[in-house]
Image (cartoon, coloured by chain):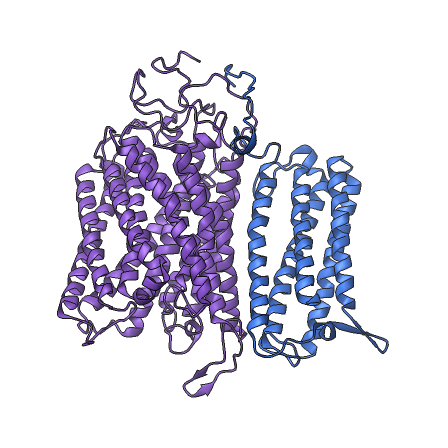
Chain colours: A blue, B purple
């Protein structure tokens, strides 16, 4: 630190120029945003484009195919007793996943408060809910496969139904599974107090901080948000 | 301070970015092979890209052998010719240009130019390179796979890309290509996140975005674009892989092949084209924007003059980046899409000429009354401007639907995109290598060999691609391995084809001279000293040349001014470094 430091008091110009000045400002564009958090936001933006392309492709396929699309409220229904309840499983899955976002928020909050025990508890609960979601998805997949739905065709209608379904839910399910793994890793780190003592990461050899819990949370909320779109476009349409 | 402050300013804000926690290598392996130092990673990226680029060069020779002297070389079958075309195109666009500009120059220059000790996530940065290398190896493996590499053309249009008639379509060629591209996207994302976050969040004190050298602006914007465009490629590759491996029908309509109805049904080949070009058109600018940025710095430095209209240059880069996402379907005028689409995309395409022209004017105005030193980087920079304008003018022809339709799929298109996206960025790459080689190695590249390399490459490229426009205007189609005695092929067209081929060999051999120069000068080049071009940007002000791990000495430099203080009246020297706190004419007085 040279002694050239003079409190900087350049007045911000008004309007658009001020906006540009803020964005272009010294050293950091986003003040008080850690590198990890900035990276996660930008990664999620990129990932949004991936899911966007998948969903747009699915919509195109659904509109361009000449064979009628399967009736989703029948295909995705469960038999409870003798009644066929449309979208029952998927409603539960959605509820589970959305709830896990709530527990994740609590985990982040307790992490920043340094209440390690509670933070770990909510991280593990989030992971459990995520794993439940993936489990139910596996159940749904096997049920559909049993009924003859394949990526290359199905008994209910257009071939693209199975193809898009397995591809998009599979891609989302992979995201959830990766999230569960990282939730467990983060939970372990919080449990051991790695973030309190600044213990170095195994791969990156960087010191961690409770910021990582929040970055993990960003990813998790994103995965939830994407599910809302998949749910809307795949099951409700 | 958004205002471009030409002079020194007194107030330097306190440091906000904590000192970077660097990984210090303990062994030869972690220092030079599995290195987390962006500079080493940059050299690994560049070396791999140049190596695979040589493969593409040889492939282009083989194509020219066939086109110039059809029927002479038995080993170039039509299938082989398609494979050469495909691999040449894909290697040049993705594995050479993208990797070299972003992975190579990006890694080397971003931390140095913004005043950071390294990229923000060195470990992910290292992984980025190794995944890229894996992608290259998978690509190379397809040459040795049964049936050879894919011959689908670099655009990989389905349904033909995954059908029997296409080389590698029903063998492993296309699979390896798609897997390689998917790996490339994953690897690039890891690096790309690094570049973006480093520019946004890890600059040194005093380095506002509006004081960044334009090189960083170009690479930064291109990386943001790549992070948003590559997803479309990834999705297209995944879907085509499913079509090929699982028998899904995303891109496959009902097809009758050899009198037999395939079981695919209802897919949309046009969907692939949309996805591909949603990646493919931004890709053009992903390659062009770093070139724009670098060339701006080369011109300012070697003409000893501040860049004209810095702020306008920045907005032009950002504007081109944004616009390039809404022009993609101008590659698809003849695909059978709705004609109104063509109207929209022709309009946006021509609008993009505005920011591009602003940049060209600004380069010219920077040169105007400058103290032009015809060094080799400058020669290449000038060659770029000329070539880019040439390529841009033919772009006006192809951007208009009615003019494009007859020219579509002719050699005119080939000549156009080689000028604008082949020759132009590659001249910048050469210029940049001549410019920064002294910083990377501490020695200058040999001047005489450089002059030879420049003139042969520059004149040769024109002798290759100018006649090609003419050949295309006569109606010679692209992607035909042999034209035979078609009525439209006059004798002059045949002669021109032979001439183009001979020129291609000569230009190709000149590149070997360049490679020799690169290797020879590491030991025998003239000592460069820390700042041979007397440039202002931070990478030339490092304590050591080449810069060591951590880039700068004990203290990070503090930036007091923009990157273009050349020939300031009254200043002691004709440049004032960015970290020089002095007022005009009295450097150091202000500290």
**B168 to B437, vertically: above or below:** below
Picture quadrant of residue A191:
top right
Residue B401 is left or right of residue A44, and the answer is left
Task: Judge whether residue A128 can be spotted in this image.
Answer: no
Q: Nearer the viewer, residue B301 or B336?
A: B336
On-image quarter of the C terminus of chain A: bottom right
Residue at x-position 58% and y-position 38%: A35
**B359 to B369, vertically: above or below:** below
Q: Nearer the viewer, residue B258 or B191?
A: B258
Q: Position of residue B146 (x, y in %)?
A: 38, 73
Q: Position of residue B299 (x, y in %)?
A: 29, 35
Residue at x-position 56% and y-position 45%: A42
Residue B194 is left or right of residue B537, and the answer is right
**A48 to B487, vertically: above or below:** above
Task: Judge whether residue B209 can be spotted in this image.
Answer: yes
Q: Residue furthest right?
A: A81
Picture quadrant of residue B319:
top left
Residue A25 is left or right of residue B156, and the answer is right
**B169 to B112, vertically: above or below:** below
Residue at x-position 23% and y-position 28%: B371
Picture quadrant of residue B562:
top left
Residue at x-position 53% and y-position 17%: A5
Q: Position of residue B451 (x, y in %)?
A: 18, 41
Q: Residue furthest bottom?
A: B259
Numbered disc total = 0
Q: Residue furthest top?
A: B589
Q: Position of residue A203 (x, y in %)?
A: 57, 44
């Amino acid at each position: 630190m040279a002694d050239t430091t003079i409190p900087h008091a350049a007045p911000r110009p008004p309007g658009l120029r001020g906006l540009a000045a803020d964005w272009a400002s010294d050293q950091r564009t986003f003040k008080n945003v850690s590198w990890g958090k900035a990276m996660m936001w930008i990664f999620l933006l990129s990932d949004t484009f991936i899911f966007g392309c998948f969903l747009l492709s699915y919509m195109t396929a659904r509109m361009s195919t000449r064979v009628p699309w399967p009736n989703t409220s029948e295909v995705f229904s469960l038999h409870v007793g003798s009644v066929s309840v449309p979208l029952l499983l998927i409603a539960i899955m959605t509820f589970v996943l959305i709830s896990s976002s709530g527990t994740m928020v609590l985990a982040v909050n307790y992490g920043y408060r340094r209440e390690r025990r509670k933070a770990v508890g909510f991280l593990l609960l989030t992971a459990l809910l995520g794993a439940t979601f993936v489990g139910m998805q596996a159940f749904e997949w096997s049920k559909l496969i049993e009924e003859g739905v394949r990526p290359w065709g199905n008994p209910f209608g257009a071939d693209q139904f199975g193809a898009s379904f397995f591809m998009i839910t599979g891609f989302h399910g992979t995201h959830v599974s990766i999230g569960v793994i990282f939730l467990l890793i983060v939970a372990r780190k919080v449990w051991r107090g790695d973030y309190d003592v600044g213990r170095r990461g195994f791969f990156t050899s960087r010191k961690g901080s409770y910021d990582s819990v929040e970055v993990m949370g960003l990813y998790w909320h994103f995965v939830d948000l994407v599910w809302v779109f998949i749910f809307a476009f795949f099951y409700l349409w | 301070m958004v205002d471009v402050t030409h002079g020194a300013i007194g107030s330097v804000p306190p440091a906000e970015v904590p000192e970077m926690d660097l990984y210090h290598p303990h062994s030869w392996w972690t220092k030079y092979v599995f290195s987390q130092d962006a500079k080493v990673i940059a050299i690994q990226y560049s070396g791999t890209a140049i190596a695979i680029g040589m493969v593409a060069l040889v492939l282009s020779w083989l194509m020219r052998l066939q086109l110039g002297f059809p029927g002479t070389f038995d080993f170039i079958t039509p299938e082989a010719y398609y494979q050469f075309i495909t691999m040449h195109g894909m290697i040049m666009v993705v594995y050479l240009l993208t990797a070299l500009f972003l992975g190579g120059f990006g890694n080397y220059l971003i931390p140095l130019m913004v005043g950071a000790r390294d990229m923000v996530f060195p470990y992910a940065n290292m992984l980025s390179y190794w995944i890229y290398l894996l992608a290259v190896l998978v690509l190379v493996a397809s040459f040795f796979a049964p049936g050879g590499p894919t011959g689908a053309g670099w655009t990989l249009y389905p349904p033909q890309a995954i059908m029997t008639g296409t080389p590698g379509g029903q063998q492993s060629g296309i699979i390896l290509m798609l897997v390689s591209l998917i790996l490339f996207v994953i690897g690039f994302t890891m690096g790309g996140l690094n570049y973006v976050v480093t520019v946004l969040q890890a600059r040194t004190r005093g380095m506002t975005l509006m004081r960044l050298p334009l090189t960083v602006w170009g690479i930064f914007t291109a990386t943001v674009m790549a992070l948003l465009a590559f997803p479309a490629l990834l999705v297209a590759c995944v879907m085509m892989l499913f079509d090929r491996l699982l028998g899904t029908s995303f891109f496959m309509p009902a097809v009758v092949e050899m009198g037999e109805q395939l079981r695919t049904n209802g897919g949309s080949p046009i969907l692939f084209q949309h996805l591909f070009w949603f990646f493919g058109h931004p890709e053009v600018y992903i390659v062009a924007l770093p070139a724009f940025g670098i060339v701006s710095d080369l011109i300012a430095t070697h003409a000893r003059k501040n860049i004209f209209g810095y702020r306008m240059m920045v907005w032009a880069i950002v504007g081109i980046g944004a616009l390039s996402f809404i022009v993609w379907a101008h590659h698809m005028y003849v695909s059978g899409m709705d004609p109104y689409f063509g109207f929209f995309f022709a309009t946006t395409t021509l609008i993009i000429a505005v920011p591009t022209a602003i940049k060209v004017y600004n380069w010219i105005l920077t040169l105007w009354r400058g103290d032009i030193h015809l060094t080799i980087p400058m020669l290449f920079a000038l060659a770029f401007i000329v070539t880019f304008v040439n390529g841009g003018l033919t772009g006006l022809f192809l951007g208009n639907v009615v003019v494009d339709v007859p020219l579509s799929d002719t050699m005119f298109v080939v000549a156009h995109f080689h000028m604008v996206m082949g020759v132009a960025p590659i001249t910048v790459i050469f210029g940049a290598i001549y410019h920064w080689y002294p910083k990377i190695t501490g020695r200058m590249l040999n001047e005489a060999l450089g002059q030879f390399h420049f003139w042969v490459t520059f004149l040769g490229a024109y002798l290759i691609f100018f006649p090609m426009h003419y050949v295309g205007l006569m109606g010679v189609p692209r992607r035909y391995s042999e034209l035979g005695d078609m009525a439209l092929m006059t004798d002059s067209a045949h002669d021109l084809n032979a001439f183009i081929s001979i020129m291609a060999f000569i230009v190709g051999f000149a590149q070997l001279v360049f490679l020799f120069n690169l290797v020879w000068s590491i030991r025998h080049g003239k000592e460069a000293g820390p700042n041979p071009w007397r440039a202002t940007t931070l990478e030339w002000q490092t304590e050591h040349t080449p810069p060591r791990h951590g880039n700068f000495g004990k203290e990070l430099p503090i930036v007091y001014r923009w990157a273009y203080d050349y020939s300031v009246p009254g200043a002691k020297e004709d440049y004032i470094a960015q970290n020089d706190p002095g007022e005009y004419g009295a450097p150091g007085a202000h500290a």
